[in-house]
Image: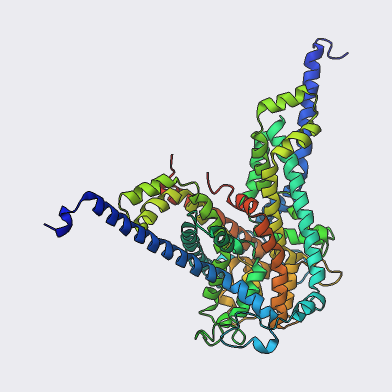
Amino acid sequence: MRPDSRNGSGERGSRCRRGRASRRRRRLAARYTLLTIGALVVLAPLYLTFVSSLLPPSALAERPPPLFPLDPQWHDYVIAWTQGDLGVYLRNSAIQTGIIVCGQLVTSVLAGYAFAFLRFPFKRALFVVFLATLMIPFEVTLVTNTQTISELGWYNTFAGLTVPFLATGVGTFLLRQAFLQIPRDLREAATLDGYGRLRFLLRIALPLARPALAALGVFSFLAAWNQYLWPLVVTGSGNGVRTVQIGLKLLQGTEVSRTDVALAGTVIAVLPLLVLLVVFQKQLVRSLTAGAVK
Amino acid sequence: MSRGRESPPARTRRSRAVREAALGYLLVLPALAVFGVFVFYPFAENFRLALYQTPPYPGLPSRYVGLHQVGQVLASSGFLQSLGSTLLFVVMVVPAGLLIGLLLAVAAHRRLRAMAVYRVIFSSTVVTSVAVSALVFGTLMDPVVGLLPWLGLNPSPPILQNTTWALPAIAVMSVWQFLGLSFVVMSAGLSAVPEEVLEAARVDGASERTVFWRVTVPLLSPTIFFGLVVATIYAFQTFGQVDILIGYSSAAFEHVNLLVYDILNTIEVAKTSGQAAVLSLALFLLTLGVTLLQLRLVERRVHYAA
């Protein structure tokens, strides 16, 4: 017989509770430890880049690496912006991304509307055709697309950068689903009130589809801004429509080959997207996980 | 009146249907035109180009060689090495990225203080581009200004020129870059798992590890499966890391010549579009094959909660 077996049930209960509480506290501590280690590992590369970009060149090779820039040097940013042409590249990226985002929203809304509300022959077959585009990676079409662009005289133009991306199967699908969720009653009420198709689209369908529009907008912004392969293939030097991602490669490679300047350029290039992440986290998550959870 | 027999309402109904159909085609047309010119036409053109050999000098007509070229490219040592590196790369990046993303998502799942901050941090690499990641890691791995020598890792030749270590180095960078997406997808999957189920398992005395492997992972299997397919397809398309950090002048190039890089090299440097078309079709079949294989193998074992 164990000595404490005669104890009252109340005391045993409280000891048990105390044990559970301390175990819970240990678990909580373990969880925060894991989270913090994870956060440090994930953040370290970008943080070290940021710190290094502010160090004087002589301090770059200091070991252990300085964790805080005591004497921040902003002139690398000035060099990256002017000699590295980062200002021009950023402008080009903004134009390219703007065209692609607007284009994808417009074509997806139009096609999504047609697939959701209109009746026409071969509608199902055409919808399958739209979805089939998802099975063909862009890289597979590279051989002929580069030829098409040069035959159209679009090499090194915004048209060449953007036109191949002005439509999206996923976007059309997203908008179609959002439109289909609009209650039938609402459509009939709108018709009774004398709403034409355009007024119904602008006043009712688009406002109700705002979450889908936001998700598509944020996603296509992210994808367009971060494009690397296509801008590399269809742009060159000369009258310059090169985007910031290509600018980064050049910063590291030939033009201004200095590590600290390249790092400053990296920070400039990633900053707009970090802002996007913090401001539009909800929309971004929704767009990235469309399809992940059934 | 040619259709005198029809009643006026029937006629207006029909003309309305015609107008509706016309509008439908009109609205679909812009997207369809883009897809036609920049997706379906170039895709189909691969099949034709694959049968023709690019002439040795520009200006000469290309020669029809049939399937000869297809066999030649697919059996070439260059392609086999590229394929091997690509598959190895997928094996190094996809499981690690998914598992770490899942662990972070599980750890950050509870409603606790400061969780929002952790979530933003964990999802942050979703917005870092290939070029940004490559520059960041290129600096960290630099033999002079990088951190690796200081950490005692200083292989010779330097890691990115090293035939053994260049591919794993690129893979580490890619895992980091993939963590954000992995975390976001896994978190979304987790939030769909009913908390009561996990709590019930804990009340029954299951340890956290048992809960994770026996309850969370099976319930999350649709999400993990989705992540697996998407991540594998992304990994097949890897290009920027190789272009920025390795390049075809590197000593390690042959060991890091991933498929898409090989395609671009064949287009731009070798300028043999026929061979590039064969490689493109190989990439397509690989993507398609993995998708179908995973659908068959994994779908059967995936647990879909009712």
Task: Decide: is A196 above or below B157.
Answer: above
Q: Residue at x 63, y 44 (%)?
A: A131
In the image shown, does A179 or A2 lie closer to the viewer?
A2
State the image quarter where residue B129 is shown.
bottom right
Residue B75 appears in the figure: no
Residue B280 appears in the figure: yes
State left or right for residue B161 relative to residue A280: left
State the image quarter where residue B54 is shown.
bottom right
In the image shown, does B91 or A279 lie closer to the viewer?
A279
Give the quarter of the figure containing the C terminus of chain B: top left
Task: Decide: is B232 above or below A198.
Answer: below
* Residue A7 coordinates in the image, percent (x, y): 18, 54
State the image quarter where residue B251 is shown.
bottom right
Give the quarter of the figure containing the N terminus of chain B: top right
Farthest residue, direction bottom: A58
User: In the rendered picture of this protein, how many numbered marks are placed on residues?
Assistant: 0
* Residue A18 coordinates in the image, percent (x, y): 32, 58
What color scheme is it? rainbow
* Residue B208 coordinates in the image, percent (x, y): 37, 57
* Residue B175 coordinates in the image, percent (x, y): 54, 67
Farthest residue, direction left: A1
Task: Decide: is B125 above or below A169.
Answer: below
